[in-house]
Image (cartoon, helix red, strand yellow):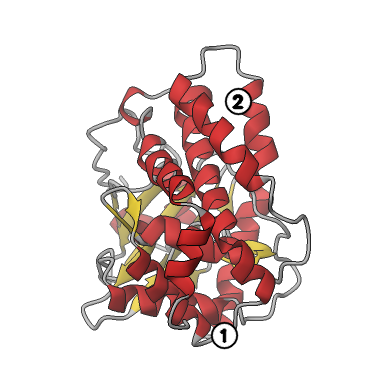
Amino acid sequence: MRRITCLRRPAEKNMSHPKIPDILSAYFEHPHAVICTEFNSGLTNFNFQVKDEPGKMFFLKIFRNANLLRIKSVATLINHLQHYRFPTPEIIPCLSGDYCWNDGKEGAIITRFIKGKYPENTEENLYRIGNILGALHQIPASAGLLQGYSLNYPELLKQVYNFDGVIEEEFSNFLVSINPVIGNIPLSGFPQSIIHGDIFLDNLLQTSLGDIYFIDFEGGCVDKSIFDIARSVIGCAMINQKFDLKLTKAILSGYTAVRDFEPIEQEYLYEFIIYAGAISVMWRYTEFNIRRPFENKKNLYKKLLIPTLNLIETGKRIFQDAIYSNQI
């Protein structure tokens, strides 16, 4: 009898994944001795803390609504980053040697467990986050990595327009507000690199020694570096639903200590922050208000809608004057 302990999230039912026994059997020689406890984290994936018989700790992520090509690409990317000693948890192979489990329909990966907490958004921490991000964007890409971020504005917009139900007025007005700004972004000319794609404070871990690890690379791919920078501002540099300019400058200072901004990146950072905000808002709206309506999550999009609108109201010139004054 396999001993599997799964704590359910209080907000949702039936979250303990039925395929856990199969996954554990693929990774551990004695799965009956493995304890698997569900984390109350992640918007759409199933996340578990795993402890094997010798007492070693691991982190299990079962992907929901992700194709197997992307899951395999995540495993390839993590291994590639490990080769360059990038601070992300080491991925663990299955007994077969494969670096991800799949049954043809769903997939999962297991990594080393990093004991830590989400970093606070202090200037010191954000400088370090920017510094690590700059190092990520310097790592050369390799064969097997996906090209292009999985979420894009036209595709999300299509989901909204194809929806037969009622679109909330606040969300509709948001689309009207962001379109002129996003329309200013050139279609080409931006440097590309490996990107994380989803840099929020809860996708980072800080150890007791102060080391910061980047986790949750399921959005990782090769795409515009500037998107990752903008996404880190969205995810880390807000206070009271407004972008804090000192925290934004801290990210950029850490980043440019490792990698220079190209002139086109400096010119269009403002638009890309709004674009990154729009992607996050639209994904949350389509995921929890259209694709999988869920009462407790239907207003999650508003947490990013408000600061994005606030930045539009601030205006590009005021933003640039504040960010680029006194040289970064």
Q: Crowdedness of circle 2 by 10 Å Cα count: few (<14), some, many (20+)?
A: many
* Lateral position of residue 177 relative to residue 179, left or right: left
Q: What x and y, as percent, mark residue 95? A: 53, 65
Q: Residue at x 59, y 60 (%)?
A: 227
Tag 2 residue: 160
Q: Residue at x 41, y 73 (%)?
A: 249
Q: Is residue 131 visible?
A: no
Position of 131 relative to 217 (above/below): below
The quadrant in which residue 262 appears is bottom right
Nearest to the eye among marks 2 and 1: give it. 2
The amino acid sitting under disc 2 is Val
Above or below for 83 versus 186:
below
For label 1, the residue is 84
Q: Which mark is residue 261?
A: none
Image location (x, y in percent) of residue 143:
76, 71
Left or right: 328 as drawn, with respect to 189: left
Asked if residue 200 is positioned above or below residue 209 in the image, the reply reads above
